[in-house]
Amino acid sequence: MFGGPNLDTLFVTSMAKPPLPRFPDDGQLRGSLFAIDGLGVRGVPEPRFGA
């Protein structure tokens, strides 16, 4: 989803799945929200739900 004042920040979530037993330290960012700037693209405004 794009957001921010200029709709130029991409927000991405990661899945939260338990790590595999053979990789116990894998996925420490599971369930995180990432904000990515500087892509050179913008989103478009969406109407609010129910509006």
Image (spheres, grey):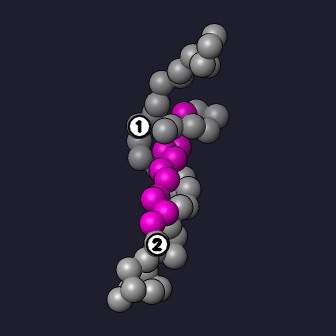
**Disc 1 residue type (three-letter):** Val
Q: Nearer the viewer, residue 6 or 19?
A: 19
Residue at 49% across / 38% down in the picture?
1
Nearer-N-terminus badge (2/1): 2
Image quadrant containing the C terminus:
top right
User: Can residue 8 be seen at all in this image of the molecule?
Assistant: no
Question: Callout 2: 10 Å neighbours few (<14), some, many (20+)?
Answer: few
Q: Mark 2 near mark 1, Cβ–Cβ under 8 Å?
A: no
- The magenta span reads 7-17
- Magenta stretch: residue 16 in it? yes
From mark 2 to mark 1, how far is it between C-alphas? 34 Å
Residue at 46% across / 72% down in the picture?
18
Residue at 61% across / 38% down in the picture?
4
Q: Quadrant of residue 22?
A: bottom left
Looking at the image, residue 21 sits to the left or right of residue 7; the answer is left
Q: Where is residue 15 drawn, in percent x and y?
A: 45, 59
Label at residue 41: 1
Label at residue 18: 2
